[in-house]
Image: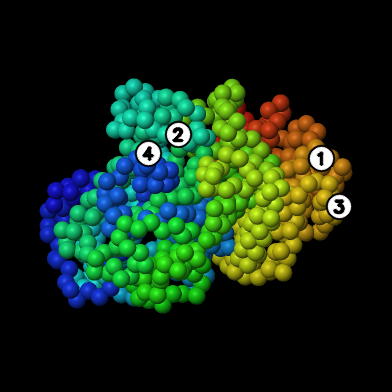
Amino acid sequence: MKHTCVLAAAGLIPAASAGAQAPKATISQTRPNIVFLMAEDLSTESFALYNGHGAHAPNLERMAAHGIVFNNAYSCAPVSSAARSSLFTGCYAPSMGLSWHRKLEPVTLPEDIHIFPWYLQQAGYHTTNVQKTDYNFVGNEDGWDNVKARIGAWRKRPSEDTPFFHCITVTACHESSLQFPAADMDTVKTMHDPAKVVLHPQHQDTPLMRYTYARHYDAIYKVDQVLGDVLSMLEEDGLLDNTFVFYFGDNGGCTPGTKAYTNDYGLHVPMVAYVPERFKDLAPYKYGSRCDALVSFLDLGPTLINLAGAELPKHLDGEPLLGRNVGTTDLDSKDVVFNYGDRFDETYAMNRVVRKVDYQYSRNFYPYQAKWLYAYYRLKQPAFAEMLDLHNRGGLNEVQDRFFRKQGAEELYLLSSDPFETASLVADPEYGQVLERMRKILDEKMISEIDLGVIPEALWLDHVKDLESYKATIRDRYAGYLETANLARYPYADVEKRLKKALAGKDEIVRYWALVACCGYGSEALPLLPLVRKIASRDSGLNMSKAAMFLAITTGENPSPKFDECVAVSRNQGEWLMVLNDAAFVKWECPQIKLAITPTPELNNTYGRERLKYLNGNRPLFE
């Protein structure tokens, strides 16, 4: 087993297995085996298989020749735990409180919902997981025969006739692989030539950025070696002709502005399915085909359950891509996907994204923010820090600098002509009808799901053990909440009266979204200043903070004392994190205001400390 020695040395397979021949599969196996190889932080834009100029992955390309390439696969979210929560439940994560990365409190899944490996278990499959799980709910091990397995754990299944599901996460290309010391550029040579990489138009053409791309391509090659080892193990065990192998990224890429951001290259992932000879009748396409259907992580659980010949649970939001009763017509009809982004570590950024055929629509619920808002983990990557520095010095071009400017309430792109989303069509009257259709599609989805993004995290966080009951209490009011939030989509003059009524209303959530809209309009909304001041003087910490932020950006008032008060009255960590998020926005938008946030005991955790370092500069944090 010459290929498995590398995996054994890395501790990914038991050393004893590296030299042992597993029993050959027998013809009596009637259902396919399934292997997932999930590689972290990969976008289609990094692969020659997708664009002709990215990294070559020989084993993946060999798989593609004996399977199906999905051209338009989406990870639902641009960061791991939020994406994996949709992947493993088969459910739209924002409707279950699972799209906030990372969880402040673990959500309890409803009793009738299990991760999809559980359904495979019930169908007689041996299920094993290698490396991370990283879900935003409790019950991580429900459905796994071994949740901390090593590669090749199928060899320990009860019998050679037992079908298996083996899930592998490969971390070699994780974002952290690009957090290298500057000296590496001189001392660590790359396989890929930095001079030959093709940069995204959003990225500065500098030696550091080119080197970063080359390092990322090298990491992709390392993942491909692991894939080759896994394929060799299956072949040596006589299992390759019985086993579907899926290769995909767990979210979009990790170069600056990709991972954690809901643009196409933060969500659009490579996905290739190897189709075994013995079960090729379960695939609707011939070997080497490319599928243009719009598919997402929501479809993978249903696909595996269908391949196993089991009944599909009714709660699943996705549809099978392979298996019996799935044809090319079924896939060709899949022309819409929904993606989302909420909190990423300490940074709040609620975005909802719909792709319909070639149009991509983004609803940015905090329109005043840039895509960029300070997040300490992002700046561990030298190329990201360089990008920020160039912005500060005026060294980026118009397309590159958009990342650091106000994003607005909506964006619309035609991906067939603008794949990197460089010029929004929202203001173009030629696309007015398209914009209205995309708005309607998203609104209907959010209302039907009771998308909890409309409910500030601080308000539902105390209900994580029974979110379904909480959702029932807000169901009748939900459409009204979304309608208020959507006022920000329209010109101020058209919604001023409705904003005035909402600010004076009795419902905290209605007031919250009216305040968010005011912050988006900025000085245009100054006629509403008396109502905003009233909220700033007495309301929840959540709303007083938004009101103080509005006062800062329109009148220049220093909100530090009010932010301290908001932290003091916060109901939970979700509330004070949002207060600090507002403070981070003020620091970015109003650099003339010198913030001084008191480092109270409740802020003495990872997220609080990192925010305070940014907000307060070098002042001592905690005594």
Nearer to us of marks 1 and 4 is 4
Nearer to us of marks 3 and 2 is 2
Task: Label 2, secondary structure: give it.
Answer: loop
Going from N to C along the chain, the mark reached first, 1 or 2, is: 2
Alpha carbons under labels 4 and 3: distance apart: 53 Å
Residue type indicated by callout 4: His
Going from N to C along the chain, the mark reached first, 1 or 4, is: 4
**Residue that label 4 marks:** 53
Q: Name the residue rendered at 22%, 62% in the picture.
A: 240
**Residue that label 1 marks:** 524
Question: Depth check: 277 or 529 in front?
Answer: 277
Going from N to C along the chain, the mark reached first, 3 or 2, is: 2
**Do residues under tags 1 and 3 come within 8 Å of each other at their CB atoms?**
no
- Residue 199, which numbered label? 2
| Image position of 179 with respect to 157: above or below | above
| Image position of 555 with respect to 326: above or below | above
- Residue 497, which numbered label? 3
State whether residue 439 appears in this view: no
Question: Depth check: 70 or 79 in front?
Answer: 70
**Do residues under tags 2 and 4 come within 8 Å of each other at their CB atoms?**
no
Mark 3 nearby-residue class (10 Å; few <14, some 14–19, many ≥20): few
